[in-house]
Amino acid sequence: MRVIAGEARGLQLKAVPGKTTRPTTDKVKEAMFNIIGPYFDGGKALDLYAGSGALGIEALSRGMESCIFVDQNKQAIATIHANLSRTGYTDKAEVYRNDSLRALKAVGKRDVAFELILLDPPYAKQQIATIFGLIDDYHLLAPAGVTVCETALHIQLPDTAGPLIKEREECYGDTKLTVYKKG
């Protein structure tokens, strides 16, 4: 697992030990950022279900100014910190060990909006409809922001969810990427 592009290009990232996380493959990560970017001119990102932090770190490497990483797994949090240190992005990041729904509520109280929200929930525990509701309730997506969902191939996401409109859907093996923008 590595950073694909940007200022940290080529740096190897640690994976979360054990079998509790499913890292996004480099192929899917590269495709994701080619769809939504590939580069950014500042902005804030939210990496929910961050795992190793690879998606948020890729966003930072490609120009996001800051990223909040959230995961409830203790080993994932340690891995995110190690990967942020390795890439030199510690000062651009906030890392929280929390349940995704609680984290969204906490971030919502801070009155912050994100240009990029990355959702890569465990395939067996997807609560994307609830998450979309909280993103809408707390106005977490900036007006020109993008939300990217990584799901199992068989998961059907809605065409619209509150103000979010499905912009694009691509499949890579058993993984589906769905991109939403504000309507």
Image (cartoon, rainbow, N blue to C red):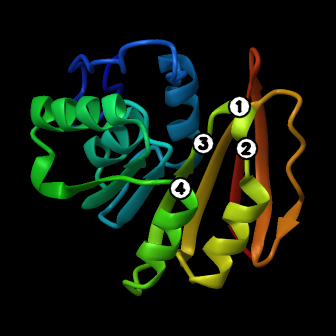
- Where residue 24 appears, as percent x and y from the top left, is 53, 24
Marks 4 and 1, Cα distance to the nearest angstrom? 14 Å
Marks 2 and 1, Cα distance to the nearest angstrom? 6 Å
Q: Amino acid at mark 4?
A: Ser
Q: Quadrant of the N terminus?
A: top left
**Secondary structure of residue under mark 1:** helix
Tag 4 and tag 1, C-beta contact below 8 Å: no
Disc sitting over residue 100 in the figure: 4
Residue located beneath label 2 in the image: 126
Dot 2 crowding, Cα within 10 Å, few <14, some 14–19, many 20+: some
Tag 2 and tag 1, C-beta contact below 8 Å: yes
- Where residue 5 appears, as percent x and y from the top left, is 32, 31
Q: Say which label, 3 or 1, has the lower sequence index.
A: 3
Disc sitting over residue 123 in the figure: 1
Q: Amino acid at mark 3?
A: Ile
Residue located beneath label 3 in the image: 35
